[in-house]
């Protein structure tokens, strides 16, 4: 499965360096193996083959000269990787020079590192030149935006991928041998694959392929020996095999350097981390701008923010793995600023460059000094540290007097356009610390109240505050429990505990995104080139806008809100239990339904904290809005809504898997349409059949005849009894609500929404299996080869999943599918944004469907069927409901099966009439006022001046 998450500067550097060394070492070894090159007296005869994968800079140059003398051609992919590592090293070298300039007295060690580092860059450049790089570069087409250059770039990326695949394939063989299993199962890359079938030249590494061929038996090997010496020789210990590269994994290929080299690699990793954080922060800030000013659903922005945080965690993990103990934000920040933030303010700049031609040379378009404290997230980090330090002082949930002097009486309506820069910074700092106080007080409330009200003795610094820890069953904050758990754990340490080493870059990044969401809604954005960008706040925008639509606490929109739908469905399930004479018939479903109802009502969009929780301090925003934790955080409202939508979807799938009515109504509706009892389809049920085809129909297609058998085929297709027991066991062992509502444990309804997939993957897109992705998702298309993507494009011209109760249902118009090769972080997130938007409020809106209301409508339909048929003294009804009264708990199943058999005309016409009278569409059962089924809003992005500013920042480098 192809990776879609772009590599940052450090990941790319390590990958390119490993593959570059792999090719050069293997190519050099192959040449040295040849008799011509190894003749006595030749230069190559003096060199030994490399069997470790590790070389010095001097040895690397010598290998390049050997290859240049004997190889016929060097793959273009090798030149590109050389350019890549040279650029990466040059970037760090320049950063070293900037850092050295921070001190008034030159640092001898830093100067020595720069000299050594320059020597390494010069050596790499020499390798490039020796291998014929300049001539290759001159032949490359210009990359100034033409369609031809784009196509060529795509082709080169594909050739790079082919080289990578060959290296990975051979590396797998090495790992296989390292396990002591031998090499017989794998012979390495097929040398024939290096040649293209049409005779065109390929960029495959031909010079290195010989080393992978199976070694031929030496003359005489395997012949039988004569006489008694044969047995004697067999007892002798076998001679050790000569060392080879066969057991050296790709990860071990590296250039041997002194400690300066390690420092250089660390700085490159740190540089990449900050570069990625700056870029993603600006992108996510722009998305929150769309929420406030363009009406984008907050759950879309929140999901993108979680995906961006996962990208930062990936860069953070690389540092943690390769430089353990040096991954905290404090350490990486002091590394890149040389421990002197104030001096660093004038030593970093942001530039716009454009590539002038194929040799990688660039032209500077614009440059500006970088606001280091802002762009490196230092303000957010310092606010977090100050909050933790202050909270630890008393662990009472109340700021100290000293802190109150700075943050008390925060004014949410301050006109930021009229404020000075310093006033805006103080205003943001006050908001951040006040909000963090409310966050920790709400998150920790259950434990604190156990101590203060029940007399329990939980030691705060020893409590497992993790979101999946011992208190996980107590829902406190939807969508942000992981972040809240980490911050609470830091704040609840003993007074004076230094927690700086425990604060990760990704935690600071997430806090910055949280703070930015409100700042942007108040008209204050950050630009790398323009600094503070100010505009009037959007009139009428409320962070809770979308959460309120989802829940509809005041029941202002009949048939829309989740809370009202839950109340109605609960009553219908209770009534259905009585009609069947079994009070416990829906006991399990009602329990879960009530649990979601209470938790959503008490902790989503609002919290009990707003009305004052006994023994807990009041909200820090009580002077303006006691529900300020939510009212002043678009981010919290967005992530809370996203999790709420996901849980609502999970429960809906579970409910439909456990009751028969949804399956029955879709099969019944299909038959009534096919047999013309209904003049036209009912939008809701037709859409359900289209959207969840695999769940409703055995082969994914609605039947056109033999309707009872089609229903039977689907019901019977639930897997073996062993599989059913395994699903039940998995659900019974669940230790969280999400696990208990695991859709893969369902028998029929196991389709995963995009929101569900992202959470299950830990927000890492590369962990999502292809088989779980809908064919319409751009993520799946990004992974597809050209032929598959063409076929999928044709498939997408089929029926639209939504039937909107009109004769001309709008068809989805998806943005042009981008290529996977060379996607930037922003381009990937923009592509995924289409999938998220489509799932929440677009053309494939799994997450927008109000399952309680839909289920309530289905239950009411069956109750009406039964009432009408009873009044008519319908014989089918009488036979099923009266003759077998009290003995058959699944009367509705038998009623629908009888109807599908088409033996009772009166029954069928009655059911069709009731459906017609209660006609409704998908749009009547969603949380929002409307859906954007043609993705008009997304296609409009980037047209405004604001969007263009953000796009310009996307092209910037340090």
Image: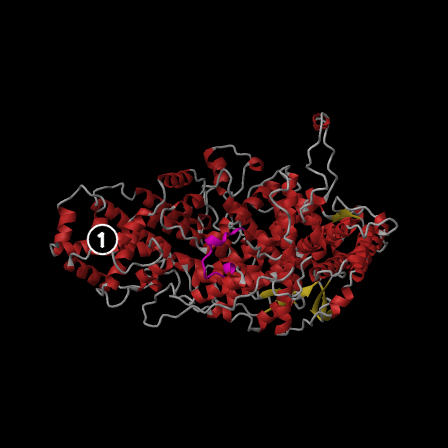
Camera sees residue 323: no
Q: Is residue 82 above or below residue 460?
A: below
Local crowd size for mark 1, using a 10 Å CA cut-off: few (<14), some (14–19), many (≥20): many
Q: Position of residue 30 (x, y in %)?
A: 75, 51
In the figure, is residue 4 to the left or right of 554? right
The one of 855 and 229 positioned closer to us in this rendering:
229
Q: Quadrant of residue 336?
A: bottom right
Q: Is residue 336 above or below residue 445?
A: below
> Which residue lies under the disc numbered 1?
896
Q: Position of residue 480 (x, y in %)?
A: 51, 50
Residue at 51% of width from left, 47% of height from top? Answer: 481
The one of 805 and 373 positioned closer to us in this rendering:
805
In the figure, is residue 918 to the left or right of 432? left
Tell which residue pokes out farthest to the right in this image. Answer: 41
Tell which residue pokes out farthest to the front in this image. Answer: 226
Q: Is residue 204 above or below residue 137?
A: above
The one of 54 and 169 positioned closer to us in this rendering:
169
The one of 582 and 122 positioned closer to us in this rendering:
122
Q: Is residue 188 above or below residue 93?
A: above
Residue at 46% of width from left, 34% of height from top? Answer: 454
- The magenta stretch is 767-780
Q: Secondary structure at mark 1?
A: helix
| Residue 120 part of the magenta segment | no
Q: Quadrant of the C terminus?
A: bottom right
Camera sees residue 498: yes
Q: Position of residue 55 (x, y in %)?
A: 78, 48
In the figure, is residue 505 to the left or right of 632? right
In the figure, is residue 167 to the left or right of 462? right
Q: Position of residue 549 (x, y in %)?
A: 40, 60
């Amino acid at each position: 499965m192809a990776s879609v998450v772009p590599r940052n500067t450090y990941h790319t550097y390590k990958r390119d360096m490993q593959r570059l060394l792999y090719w050069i070492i293997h190519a050099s070894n192959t040449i040295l193996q040849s008799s011509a090159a190894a003749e006595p007296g030749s230069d190559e005869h003096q060199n030994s083959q490399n069997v470790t994968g590790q070389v010095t800079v001097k040895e690397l140059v010598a290998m390049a000269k050997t290859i240049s003398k004997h190889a016929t051609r060097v793959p273009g992919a090798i030149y590109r990787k050389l350019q890549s590592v040279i650029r990466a090293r040059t970037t760090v070298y320049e950063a070293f020079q900037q850092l050295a300039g921070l001190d008034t007295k030159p640092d001898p060690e830093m100067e020595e590192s720069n000299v050594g580092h320059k020597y390494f860059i010069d050596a790499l450049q020499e390798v490039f030149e020796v291998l014929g790089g300049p001539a290759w570069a001159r032949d490359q087409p210009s990359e100034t935006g033409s369609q031809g250059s784009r196509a060529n770039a795509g082709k080169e990326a594909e050739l790079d991928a082919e080289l990578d695949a060959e290296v990975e394939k051979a590396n797998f063989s090495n790992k296989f041998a390292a396990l002591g299993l031998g090499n017989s199962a794998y012979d390495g890359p097929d040398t024939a694959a290096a040649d293209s079938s049409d005779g065109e030249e390929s960029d495959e590494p031909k010079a290195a392929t010989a080393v992978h061929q199976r070694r031929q038996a030496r003359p005489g090997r395997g012949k039988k020996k004569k006489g008694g010496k044969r047995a004697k020789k067999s007892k002798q210990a076998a001679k050790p095999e000569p060392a080879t590269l066969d057991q050296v994994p790709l990860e071990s290929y590296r250039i041997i350097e002194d400690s300066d080299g390690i420092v250089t690699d660390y700085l490159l990793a740190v540089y990449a981390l900050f570069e990625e954080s700056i870029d993603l922060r600006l992108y996510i800030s722009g998305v929150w701008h769309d929420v406030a000013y363009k009406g984008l659903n907050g759950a879309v922005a929140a999901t993108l923010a979680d995906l961006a945080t996962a990208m930062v965690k990936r860069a953070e993990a690389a540092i943690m793995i390769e430089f353990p103990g040096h991954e905290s934000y404090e350490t990486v920040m002091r590394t890149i600023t040389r421990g002197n933030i104030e001096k660093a303010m004038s030593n970093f700049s942001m530039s716009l460059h454009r590539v002038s031609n194929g040799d990688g040379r660039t032209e500077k378009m614009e440059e500006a000094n970088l606001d280091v404290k802002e762009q490196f997230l230092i303000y957010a980090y310092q606010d977090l540290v100050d909050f933790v330090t202050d909270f630890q002082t008393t662990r009472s949930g109340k700021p100290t007097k000293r802190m109150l002097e700075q943050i008390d009486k925060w004014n949410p309506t301050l006109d930021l356009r009229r404020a000075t820069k310093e006033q805006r910074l103080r205003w943001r700092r006050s908001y951040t610390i006040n909000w963090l106080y409310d966050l920790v007080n709400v998150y920790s409330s259950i434990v604190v109240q156990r101590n203060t009200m029940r007399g329990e003795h939980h030691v705060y610094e020893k409590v497992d505050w993790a979101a999946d820890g011992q208190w996980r069953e107590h829902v406190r904050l939807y969508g942000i429990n992981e972040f809240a758990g980490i911050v609470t754990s830091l704040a609840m340490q003993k007074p004076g505990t230094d927690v700086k080493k425990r604060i990760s870059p990704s935690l600071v990044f997430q806090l910055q995104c949280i703070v930015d969401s409100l700042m942007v809604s108040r008209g204050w954005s950050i630009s790398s080139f323009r600094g503070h960008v100010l505009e009037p706040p959007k009139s009428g925008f409320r962070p809770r806008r979308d959460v309120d639509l989802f829940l509809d606490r005041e029941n202002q929109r009949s048939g829309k809100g989740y809370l009202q739908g839950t109340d109605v469905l609960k009553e219908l399930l209770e009534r259905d239990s009585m009609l069947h004479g079994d009070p416990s018939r829906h006991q399990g479903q009602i329990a879960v339904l009530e649990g979601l109802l209470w938790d959503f009502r008490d902790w989503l969009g609002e919290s009990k904290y707003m009305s004052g929780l006994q023994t807990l301090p009041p909200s820090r925003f009580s002077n303006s809005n006691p529900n300020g934790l939510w009212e002043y955080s678009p981010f919290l409202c967005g992530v809370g809504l996203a999790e709420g939508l996901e849980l609502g979807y999970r429960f809906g799938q579970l409910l439909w898997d456990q009751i028969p009515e949804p399956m029955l109504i879709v099969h019944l509706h299909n038959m009534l349409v096919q047999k013309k009892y209904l003049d036209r389809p009912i939008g809701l049920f037709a859409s359900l059949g289209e959207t969840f085809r695999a769940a409703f129909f055995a082969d994914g297609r609605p039947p056109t005849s033999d309707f009872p058998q089609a229903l039977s085929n689907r019901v019977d297709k639930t897997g073996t009894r062993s599989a059913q027991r395994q699903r039940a066991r998995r659900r019974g062992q669940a230790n969280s609500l999400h696990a208990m509502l695991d859709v893969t444990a369902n028998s029929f309804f196991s389709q995963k929404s995009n929101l569900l997939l992202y959470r299950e993957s830990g927000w890492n897109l590369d962990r999502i299996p292809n088989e779980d992705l809908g064919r319409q998702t751009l993520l799946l298309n990004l992974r597809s080869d050209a032929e598959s993507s063409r076929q999928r494009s044709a498939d997408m011209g089929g029926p639209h999943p939504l039937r909107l109760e009109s004769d001309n249902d709008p068809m989805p118009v998806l943005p042009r599918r981008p290529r996977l090769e060379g996607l930037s972080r922003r381009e990937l997130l923009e592509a995924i944004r289409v999938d998220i938007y489509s799932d929440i409020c677009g053309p494939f809106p799994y997450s927008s469907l109000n399952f309680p209301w839909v289920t309530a409508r289905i239950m009411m339909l069956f109750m009406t069927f039964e009432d009408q048929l009873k009044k008519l003294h319908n014989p089918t009804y009488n036979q099923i409901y009266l003759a077998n009264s009290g003995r058959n708990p699944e009367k509705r199943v038998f009623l629908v099966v009888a109807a599908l058999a088409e033996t009772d005309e009166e029954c069928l016409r009655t059911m069709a009439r009731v459906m017609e009278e209660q006609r409704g569409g998908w749009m009547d059962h969603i949380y929002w006022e409307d859906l954007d089924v043609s993705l008009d809003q997304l296609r409009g992005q980037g047209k405004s001046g604001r969007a263009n500013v953000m796009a310009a920042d996307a092209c910037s480098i340090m």
